Amino acid sequence: MGGNETGSKVVTLSDVAKRAGVSIATASKALNDRDDVAVATRQRVLRAADELSFTPNAMARGLLAGRTRTVGLLTSDLEGRFMIPILMGAEDAFGAGQVSVFLCDARGDAIREQHHLKALLSRRVDGIIVVGRQTDPRPSLGQDIPVPVVYAYAPSDDPRDPSLTPDNFAGGRLAVEHLIACGRTRIAHITGDPSYAAAQDRIAGARAALDAAGLELVGEPMFSEWTEHWGRDAAALLLQRHPDVDAIFCGSDQIARGVLDTARDLGRTVPEDLAVIGYDNWELLTTNSRPELTSIDANLQQLGRQAAKWVFDAIDDVRIGEGVTRLPVKLVIRGSTIRRR
């Protein structure tokens, strides 16, 4: 399994390794896109695989005879822009044409979700990825499902389930550490709905970075909704109360866009006078802002890829983690915190 027939001979991974002049382990790593392989080596392995017509999809190797090569994706928010990159990442990992994905949108309705779950199981899917609409814990589908289930973005509330979610605490810390590195000391926070776990986690991370630098947040975090409109109103209020604020960490890119509008209206120059950082790295917003917006990227495609990999591992009887695994986020620097020449 995991090779291609050329004439009557099956091409195996060891054939590819031999031709590329590397060990089987290195060939496997290169084909699985692991980052501990030198670029030149990876290219040599890929070229050998190509010349021998070897189609790796290592992921699909576990889907042996008797499996349906189908996976269910159960989401509660098909419109949401968080879903799309996660789905794209999962699809990448499943490999074009190797595994079919059934997509079901429960629209946040538990009864509809149960209906979709029954439908997926009656189609004998090999595994299920459950994608939530926010990072708050969600009810588990239970332990008696006959196929592996992985929770992505919204973790399961049952510690026996494997869940993947972005590390929002680290994201908040990273945002504020960047502002402090830019020489800012009067930092305020404008964010969305206080009932969201993501909002609270980011604030906790921001406070940790401020504490470490011997600083405090200017005023209390400002909560309301995740909109540009709130960003505009909150920034007007904040800059009136605390005109000496020199940086604003925003809980989303939409809020940050609103903050940029108000800063411009009030004659505050960004980033000289006021540094502004967003969250989500929604490129549609960040790259069309003036100046372009520095933001924290939650690496959602990576999250989707990892969820798919876990499903495959579980199908292959490889033990995967229980409980919540928080995946790293990254800082994307643009002109709203550092003047671009």
Image (spheres, grey):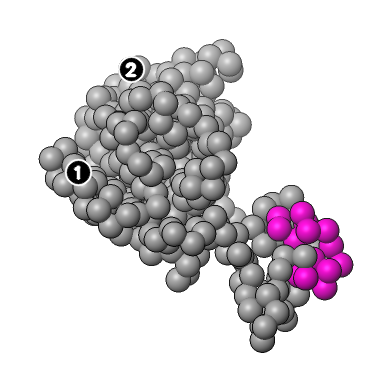
Measuring from the top left, give residue 98's x and y in whole percent: 47, 67
Residue drawn at 71 percent across, 68 percent down: 12
Residue drawn at 37 percent across, 32 percent down: 155
Q: Over which residues does the magenta segment extend?
A: 15-29
Residue position marked by numbered label 2 in the rendering:
220
* Residue furthest bottom in the image: 7
Q: Which mark is residue 301?
A: none
| Residue 91 seen in the current view | no
Measuring from the top left, give residue 267's x and y in whole percent: 35, 42
Q: Within the image, what quadrant is residue 193 found in?
A: top left
Characterize the local packing of mark 1: few (<14), some (14-19) or many (20 or more) Cα atoms within 10 angstroms. some
**Most frequent secondary structure within the magenta stretch:** helix
Give 196 or 47, whichever is nearer the viewer: 47
Q: Using the image, determine if residue 252 lies above or below residue 308.
A: above
Q: Earlier in the sequence, mark 2 or mark 1?
A: 1
Residue position marked by numbered label 1 in the rendering:
113
Measuring from the top left, give residue 50's x and y in whole percent: 68, 78
Characterize the local packing of mark 2: few (<14), some (14-19) or many (20 or more) Cα atoms within 10 angstroms. few
Task: Pick the quarter of the image with the C terminus.
Answer: bottom right
Badge 2 amino acid:
Glu
Badge 1 amino acid:
Glu
Drawn side of residue 152 relative to residue 184, left or right: left
Measuring from the top left, give residue 257's x and y in whole percent: 33, 46
Give 200 or 220, whichever is nearer the viewer: 200
Drawn side of residue 322 relative to residue 75, left or right: right
- The question of residue 260 being in magenta is answered with no
